[in-house]
Every structure is written in C-alpha cells, then in structure tokens.
Image: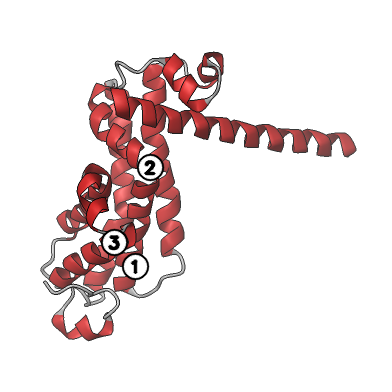
C-alpha cells in the first residue's frame, strides 16, 4: 500500500511539473509568435522566452506546427472549462447570458496574445487541425447560444431575435478586447469594457418591460 501511495504521489507531482512547463512553453510561444509570426519565430527564441531548453520543447511538441496548434487549442480548452463553471450557479436567464459573455471575455483577456495568434495562424495549419479548431470553436459557442436561447424561450428576450448570429456576435465582441486592445485599453478598463458591451447588446435584445429589473446590466443608453 505504501509503495502504491508513493507511486501515486510521484505521478501527481510529475503531472504538476508538466503542467507548469507546458504553460511556460505555450505562453512563450504565443508571445514570440505574436511578435514575429510563426514562420519567423524559432524554437530557440521560444525556448529563450520560456527559459527552458529547446530539447524540452521537443519533448512536448514534435514541431512548430504542433506548438502553434497547442497554443490555439489551449485557449479553446480554457473556454470549454471556464464558461460552464461560470454558468453553473446562475439561474436567471438574462444573467446567464451576461455570465457566459463575461467568462468568455475573461479568457480572451487572460490569453490576449494567443487569441491574436489564433486569428493569424489558424489558416496556416493543416486541414485536419483547421477542422479541429473550427469544431472546438463551435463547441465553445454552444454555451452562449444555449444561454441566449434560454432567454428567448423564457420570454425575456424578443421572440423574433435570431439566437445564432446574436450569440456569435457576442463572441466576436469579446474577441475585440484582443483584436482592438490598443483602442479599448486606452479608454476603459476591462471591467468597463464588459459592462459597456453587455449593456449595448442587452438593450437590443431584452424586452422593454424587463429593463427596470436589470439596472446593473443596462448601464448605457442605447
């Protein structure tokens, strides 16, 4: 029993070390590739940024394309984890939309360089990887779509609101914190960005009779 316990502890420790190293490598890759592009970025420059050896990177990723793919998929994995976690305690249909948007935007904020890399490099991946990225993006979008559909079906949002383009527009707005960071960051904090954007989109979807119920979400006049 003691030996089994030690093996289990060793495996847990090894996994933790791997997670730390993987995070170092992925963050460094996003930084270097966003700065120089994946073609110009060398494994050596990524290793230097991560403060690890080139050999260690190759232990985890067989080539640069595998590393680019890992950076992109890591962001999508975080969304698949963080968004349902944020939605779990929320029952109010309108606040579920707000919670989904906020969680999505927070992942974008925390992975801004990786999000930019996603836009720049997805088209350079092989077809199998491109299809995987697209499918995972659609999967992450389902959380927002279901939240919007719930607000429509429960009678809070306009019945003629098309949930698919509306929910996808919310995701694009969240992406704009990364894509137009130079503009928004000079004019407002991230929290203000989320508040303002939510207010704008909710004004157009929420039925007028429910506006007085959400003064904290409807902070901006349309």
| Name of the residue lying farthest toward the right | 2
Residue 123 lies in quadrant: top left
Q: Pointer 1: what residue?
A: 96
| Name of the residue lying farthest toward the front | 186
Bin the neighbour count of mark 3 within 10 Å (Cα to Cα): few under 14, some 14-19, many 20 and up.
Answer: many
Please name whichever residue, 53 or 61, is drawn nearer the observer in this view of the structure: 53
Q: Is residue 24 left or right of residue 150?
A: right
Mark identifier at residue 175: none
Please name whichever residue, 1 or 121, is drawn nearer the observer in this view of the structure: 121
Q: x, y percentage for residue 217?
A: 27, 73
Bin the neighbour count of mark 1 within 10 Å (Cα to Cα): few under 14, some 14-19, many 20 and up.
Answer: many
Does residue 93 lie above or below 131 as drawn? below
Does residue 216 lie above or below 14 as drawn? below
Q: Pointer 3: what residue?
A: 194
- Residue 192 appears in the figure: yes
Distance between the alpha carbons at the discs numbered 1 and 2? 23 Å
Q: Is residue 3 left or right of residue 50?
A: right
Judge depth for marks 1 and 3 and give the one in front.
3
Mark identifier at residue 111: 2
Label 1 sits on a secondary structure element that is helix
Distance between the alpha carbons at the discs numbered 2 and 3? 16 Å
Judge depth for marks 1 and 2 and give the one in front.
2
Check the picture and name the quadrant holding the N terminus.
Answer: top right
Could you tell me which residue is drawn at 38 percent across and 31 percent down? Answer: 30
Q: Is residue 178 left or right of residue 55?
A: left
Could you tell me which residue is drawn at 82 percent across and 36 percent down? Answer: 6
């Amino acid at each position: 029993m003691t030996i089994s316990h030690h093996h289990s502890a060793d495996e847990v420790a090894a996994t933790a070390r791997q997670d730390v190293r993987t995070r170092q490598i992925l963050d460094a890759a996003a930084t270097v590739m966003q700065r120089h592009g994946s073609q110009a970025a060398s494994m050596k420059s990524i290793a230097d940024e991560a403060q690890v050896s080139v050999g260690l990177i190759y232990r985890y990723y067989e080539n640069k394309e595998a590393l680019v793919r890992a950076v992109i998929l890591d962001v999508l994995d975080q969304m698949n984890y963080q968004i349902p976690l944020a939605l779990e305690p929320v029952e109010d249909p309108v606040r579920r939309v707000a919670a989904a948007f906020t969680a999505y935007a927070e992942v974008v904020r925390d992975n801004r360089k990786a999000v930019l890399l996603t836009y720049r490099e997805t088209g350079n991946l092989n077809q199998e990887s491109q299809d995987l990225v697209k499918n995972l993006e659609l999967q992450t979008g389902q959380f927002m779509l279901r939240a919007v559909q719930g607000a429509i079906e429960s009678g809070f949002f306009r019945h003629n609101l098309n949930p698919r383009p509306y929910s996808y527009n919310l995701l694009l707005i969240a992406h704009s914190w990364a894509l137009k960071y130079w503009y928004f960051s000079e004019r407002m904090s991230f929290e203000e960005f989320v508040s303002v954007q939510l207010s704008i989109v909710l004004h157009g979807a929420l039925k007028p009779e429910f506006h007085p119920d959400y003064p904290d979400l409807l902070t901006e006049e349309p």
